[in-house]
Image (cartoon, rainbow, N blue to C red):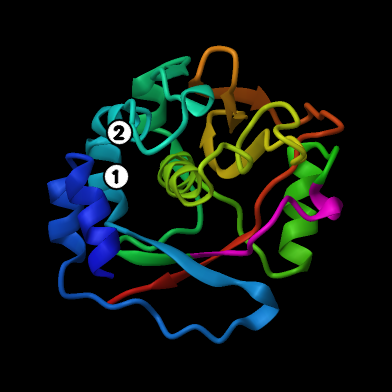
Amino acid sequence: MDQLLAFYRSHGLQDWADALDGLAWPESSGEDGFEPVALMPPVALQRAQTERLLEAMTAPTDALPADEHYAGYWVQSVEALADCEILERPEGPYALWLRDGPFPESTLGLTCTKLVKEMKAHGWAGLTVHEFLVVERLQALRHGDHRWSSYHEHKGHPPGIQWLPNARSGKKVFQGYWVAKSGQVQIGACATGSKKPTRGAHPCRVTPLS
């Protein structure tokens, strides 16, 4: 827990650390391979600091080699991200659980509509934009590369272009990825009927924290 608070503070997200200070990681059961990877502050705080989060999670860092650099971000609209519909999240702080490794094959090549049905059949949720930004940075620092989120196959790892089905803007759903050529984390919004063979999703679970 101290490491996560230090992560937020070192990235200029003092308000996030303050909102989580005194809380504890949920006890891990290891059910279906899910493990807690991040604690998230209340959604209202996430929304209010969307632009700050974007800048913090895509800032240059000496912790990664030159070919894994961050060169900022590209989004269609910061305001759209801040105002997006966030589905199935508690108002207060919560723990985010993920499984290690690439997308489940069952999530690949689907429209978002079919993806959501597939995930709900397994009792899974999908990521939001704000969660994606945090986890993308944590995973890059953990692995020393962008295998988790790269648009293209990256150093032997499958593409990580992903739907973020629990964040929506009108009739569109967000997607996120890192682009090696530009070094940018990019977030766009697509129609729910769009599909790509290599695009999938990381299932997650959410646990409210008191």
- Give SS at disc 1: helix
Kind of residue at disc 2: Thr
Which residue lies under the disc numbered 2? 50
Kind of residue at disc 1: Gln
Residue found 40% across the figure and 45% down from its top: 134
Q: Can you see residue 92?
A: no
**Is residue 190 positioned above or below 124 on the image?**
above
**Is residue 166 positioned above or below 17 on the image?**
above
Q: Which residues are magenta?
A: 97-107
Instruction: Please indicate whether residue 115 sits to the left or right of residue 83 in the image.
Output: right
Name the outermost residue toward the front: 65
Instruction: Please indicate whether residue 18 sits to the left or right of residue 133 in the image.
Output: left
Mark 2 surroundings: few (<14), some (14-19) or many (≥20) residues within 10 A: many
Which residue lies under the disc numbered 1? 46
Q: Where, quadrant-wise, is the C terminus in this rendering?
A: bottom left
Residue found 68% across the figure and 38% down from its top: 160
CA gap, disc 2 and disc 1: 6 Å
Labelled pair 2, 1 in contact (Cβ < 8 Å): yes
Q: Where, quadrant-wise, is the N terminus in this rendering?
A: bottom left
Q: Nearer the viewer, residue 101 or 80?
A: 101
- Give SS at disc 2: helix
**Is residue 148 positioned above or below 82 on the image?**
below
**x%, y% of residue 129?**
47, 39
Q: Nearer the viewer, residue 101 or 64?
A: 64
**x%, y% of residue 87?**
50, 51
The count of marks equals 2
Residue found 54% across the figure and 72% down from its top: 35
Q: Nearer the viewer, residue 157 or 90?
A: 157
Q: Quadrant of residue 151?
A: top right
